[in-house]
Image (cartoon, rainbow, N blue to C red):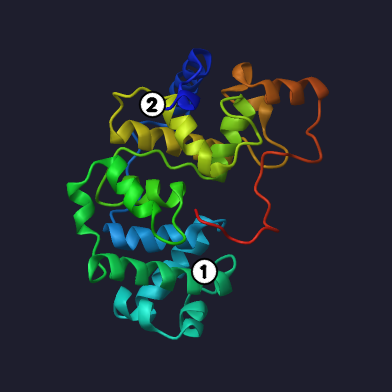
Amino acid sequence: MARSLLPDPAKSALALEAHRLLCAEYGCPIGYFHALDPLSELVSSLLSHRTKNRDSHRAFESLRRTFPDWEAVRDAPVAEVEAAIAGVTWPEAKAPALQRTLRAVTEQRGGLDLSHLHGMTEAEAAAWLSALPGVGPKTAAAVLSFSTLRGRALPVDSHHHRVAARLGLIPASLAVGPAHAVLAAQLPAEWDAQQLYDNHQVMMRHGQRCCFFRNPACGRCVMRDHCPEGQARLARGASASTDPFGPSLALPPNPA
């Protein structure tokens, strides 16, 4: 493991305590929310970048209704793909980006098929996926964890990142991409795929249901005794009007 990724024992202990408390709050183990093949999960994950889950799901289903297969999505006029995913954030950027990724898979594999990932280690599969245009740590981890690969990977979305930053597990200035490796290193190496999936799910759900971008509900947070940000907010008696931990939707999409 790289020296920079050696976890602080105190932060590892905090990560485990957060996992324990949040699993008690949200109920672990958590069932996988779908069972897409790796290629379909790749498409779904690319659509989800900085987009609400319900909107990216609708766009994914729109693609499947509009086109007979992913080859047709790859080869269609970009305007048709953009129209099909109109409900996501920045469809004008995501449509050509999605097609570039699908073309790169075709060039690498001779067709749109990611079945070879089943024979790779998680590290090898993540590296292969991350070499594709438009694919970053979040998308690679999502394909490994959420798809039928059911691999050992820790996706980190903006909600997960926000909770981790407020707890002090990562600096607020650390971007989502590099946060993947730091947060994964804080968790036990012997954890299986379900435990890593649970960790992402409970951190994400806490960000969605309690640790909001603005006005987090610190008073009812099960982590408040361990959260310096929450304690500071409660001591002030009011939430700050601005927040350094949330995503900026003024930014264009980048590799997820």
What residue did someone put label 2 on?
Answer: 1
At x 51%, y 56%, the residue is 255
User: Where residue 216 appears, x then y in whole percent?
Assistant: 68, 35
Q: Which amino acid type corresponds to the residue marked 2 in the rendered image?
A: Met
The Cα atoms of the two marked residues, 2 and 1, are separated by 34 Å
Task: Classify 236 as above or below 78.
Answer: above
Q: Residues within 10 Å of mark 1 (few under 14, many from 20)?
A: many
Q: Is any atom of residue 205 visible in this view?
A: no
Question: x, y percentage for residue 48?
Answer: 49, 58
* Among the 4 quarters of the image, the one containing residue 40: bottom left
Residue 36 at x, y percent in the picture: 29, 58
Q: Is residue 87 left or right of residue 32?
A: right
Tell me the element at label 2: loop
Q: Quadrant of the N terminus?
A: top left
**Viewer-closest of 33 and 60:** 60
Q: Is residue 246 at all visible to an observer of this figure?
A: yes
| Residue 4: image tag | none
Q: Position of residue 153 (x, y in %)?
A: 35, 39
Dot 2 crowding, Cα within 10 Å, few <14, some 14–19, many 20+: few
Q: Is residue 148 above or below residue 97?
A: above
For this view, does 102 lie left or right of residue 240?
left
Question: Who's the residue at 62% across and 16% down the image?
Answer: 225
Q: Secondary structure at mark 1?
A: helix
Using the image, tell me which numbered label, if any, was put on residue 94.
1
